[in-house]
Image (tube, coloured by chain):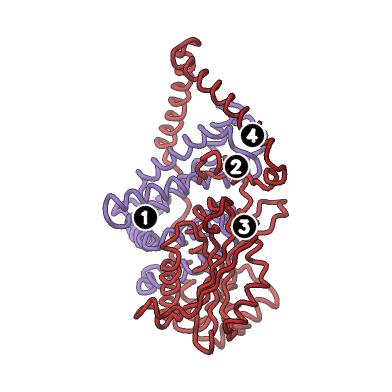
Amino acid sequence: MNCRKARRLLVDFEKKKLKGKTEDDLLLHIKDCQRCMSLCRKLETSSLALSEVTSEKIPEGTAANILEAIQERKGNETREKHKRPFLSLKNLTTAGAVAILVAVAIVAGISLMEKPAEKASFSTQEEKSTKQGKVPSKYAEEEAPRSHDFVSTPGSTEKIFEPLVKITDNNYNKDTLREFFDKSALRKEIAKRFTVASAITLRANFEQEIIDKFLDIQSEGNPKDIASQAALTQVIMSYLISGEPVQLPVYLEYAKFNGENAVIIGLAGPRFGSKSNRLKRFDVWVLAPQRFLTNRDSSIMFFLQFIEK
Amino acid sequence: MEPNKELVEKAKSGDEEAFSLLFEQYKDRIYSLCLRMTGNREDAGDMCQETFIKAFKSIEKFRSHSSFSTWIYRIAINHTKDFIRSKARKRGSPVHALSESRLLIDEANISPQEHALKTERVKIVQQALLELPENMRTPLILFEIENLEYREISRILRLPVGTVKSRIFRAKIALGEILEPLREHLE
């Protein structure tokens, strides 16, 4: 067992959730690995500390106040309903507004029917929301599930999309890198799944995901170096996407480019000048991380752009 | 423990008694979560109240493709996160644990001396918890204090299970590092 695998199991091991061969292999590894042994001790310390803090019951007075507040709200709502006379100015205004909306909807429906049918069939729930000007709610269960949810709901067959993060020994050059992304299904998948609205909503999440994954796959080395490399990666990503609020970071690879250490970052964005709100543009940036802090411009080694039809 | 669907359906159709029963089932868990996230009883009470009022207002929109507990935990976490952020902005620094002398401990059946020691230990741990970044602290609280499974945490926080696991691991390591010098006081 290597350190990377061991670290994924340490929390469950410490909680005594591992059994059989997995536990034996981990124990063998920890015995020989000082670093994992020291992590074990830290986990033990934090479990010891957390055992002091238990789940706590709500004070009776607080619970009673909350129930009272809910009932008060309910009472207010009921009073409001009874207060309003049916033919009030407010009701008439609302009725007028509804009538106008219905008329607009009919006109819009007629004009939609005149457009090609397949265009309408590609419209996802999210696109529809965007067109209607809805802002995605954070209380997401109040809405229909979005097509790009990170975590599938039970019984869902939908594939989860996560940004790709790799540390490889690949040594690319212009041609091999172009060939790699040319063949990649990633671009098509993104163009199919994501829109400008999703780029805006998910950008921060994807940035965080990339950094989390990068830290996950870094199993060896000094923790301080790993942390500073992660911080540098975040700075580079932010630098690349700062000029365009609708770019979504979806790919990160630490590899070599023409023999030099490089970070390859894939960003998805909308096609310039296109009416489509799909992320059909895919930019690939290759940068030399070691030069980035001294001179950002000179750290750019190569750039590629792909446009999905 | 998931409430039966009938109860949720009744609450959705405006049955106040059904909602009160849901409140009874979840009040302690939501309060406890808010308390660990804010480190302050008063704020936890406020957050708990806002959570249930929000749930009461929008329960008719709740769709049963996720469980009720996932839904209400998510409301509580979102409210508390917003609150912590706005409080930090007002103060210009992150929110830190209170110095309440009776902070967050079960006082039953312990001597005054034990009580004082435990109070001190809980205060130290709560302070250390609040030093963790919020995106690590919340999964850790859900896992270690609320005893939720990885899968449920992943649904609540809308994160892949792997990310939840790695955040819990990193949070525990960070907490261990903060508390290592004080380990002998904890033992």
The residue that appears at 66% across and 80% down in the rendered structure is A24
The mark closer to the camera, 3 or 2, is 2
Q: CA distance from mark 1 to mark 2?
A: 63 Å
| B81 over A117 or under it: above or below | below
Residue A8, label in figure: none
In this view of the protein, which residue sits in the foreground, B137 or A153?
Answer: A153
Q: Secondary structure at mark 2?
A: helix
Q: CA distance from mark 3 to mark 4?
A: 46 Å
Q: CA distance from mark 4 to mark 2?
A: 16 Å
Report which colour depicts chain A: red
The residue pinned by badge 4 equals A111
Q: Secondary structure at mark 3?
A: helix
The quadrant in which the C terminus of chain B is found is: bottom left
Q: CA distance from mark 3 to mark 1?
A: 40 Å
Report which colour depicts chain B: purple
The residue pinned by badge 1 equals B111
The residue pinned by badge 3 equals B151
The residue that appears at 42% across and 30% down in the rendered structure is A69
- The answer to whether tags 3 and 1 share a subunit is yes
- The answer to whether tags 3 and 2 share a subunit is no
Q: Secondary structure at mark 1?
A: loop
